[in-house]
Amino acid sequence: MLQKISYPQLNSRQQENYNFQKVSACLADYGFNCLRLTDDWHGADFLACHIDGETFLKVQLKGRLTVDKKYMGKNIYIAFSDGRTWYLYPHDPVVKHLFEAGLVKGSRSWEDEGHYSWPSLSQAVVSVIGRYALG
């Protein structure tokens, strides 16, 4: 009766909805309930509210590892999937670590356009963001 969909055949809005559902399921294992926002709110696509009643994360959903100057100072978390692994990382500290590892600084994309992203994860990048993988 049920037939799995083909992710590449989804349009961009459908892919974003799909990814929201997938990351929400992962975060449920950590005690979070995710609330989708109809419009970006302070840079967030959704809020992740923890069962402790005190922890609320503003999360931007991306298709890949991304850093962007427009998220600096906004206390934003970025969620993305690299195949079967979901990552949720605090934007500003990861930017700092990526710079320290020499993985962003001086790039034309960062310097001229204010953002940088990785279509795939090298071992050097995984060494920086690996601890933010959701198990």
Image: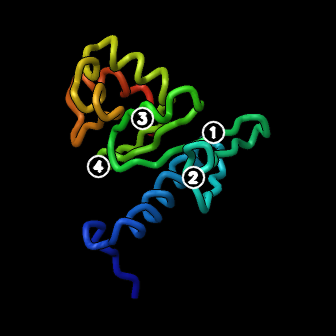
CA distance for labels 2 and 1: 14 Å
CA distance for labels 3 and 4: 12 Å
Image quadrant where one finds the N terminus: bottom left
Of marks 3 and 4, which one's residue comes earlier in the chain?
4
Q: Are marks 2 and 3 in contact (CB under 8 Å)?
A: no
Amino acid type shown at disc 3:
Ala
Report which residue position mark 1 lands on. Answer: 57
Q: Residues within 10 Å of mark 3 (few under 14, many from 20)?
A: some
The outermost residue toward the right is 53
* Residue 120 place in picture, x, y as percent: 21, 40
Q: Residues within 10 Å of mark 1 (few under 14, many from 20)?
A: some
Q: Which mark is residue 40?
A: 2
- Mark 2 or 1: in front is 2
Residue pictured at 65% horizontal, 56% vertical: 35
CA distance for labels 4 and 2: 25 Å
CA distance for labels 2 and 3: 24 Å
The outermost residue toward the front is 112
Amino acid type shown at disc 4:
Gly
CA distance for labels 4 and 1: 23 Å
* Residue 123 place in picture, x, y as percent: 21, 25
Tell which of 111 and 56 is nearer to you: 111
- Mark 3 or 1: in front is 1
Q: Are marks 2 and 1 in contact (CB under 8 Å)?
A: no
Report which residue position mark 4 lands on. Answer: 83
Report which residue position mark 3 lands on. Answer: 133
Q: Are marks 3 and 4 in contact (CB under 8 Å)?
A: no
Q: Secondary structure at mark 4?
A: loop
Residue 79 image-quadrant placement? top left
Q: Secondary structure at mark 3?
A: strand
Amino acid type shown at disc 2:
Asp
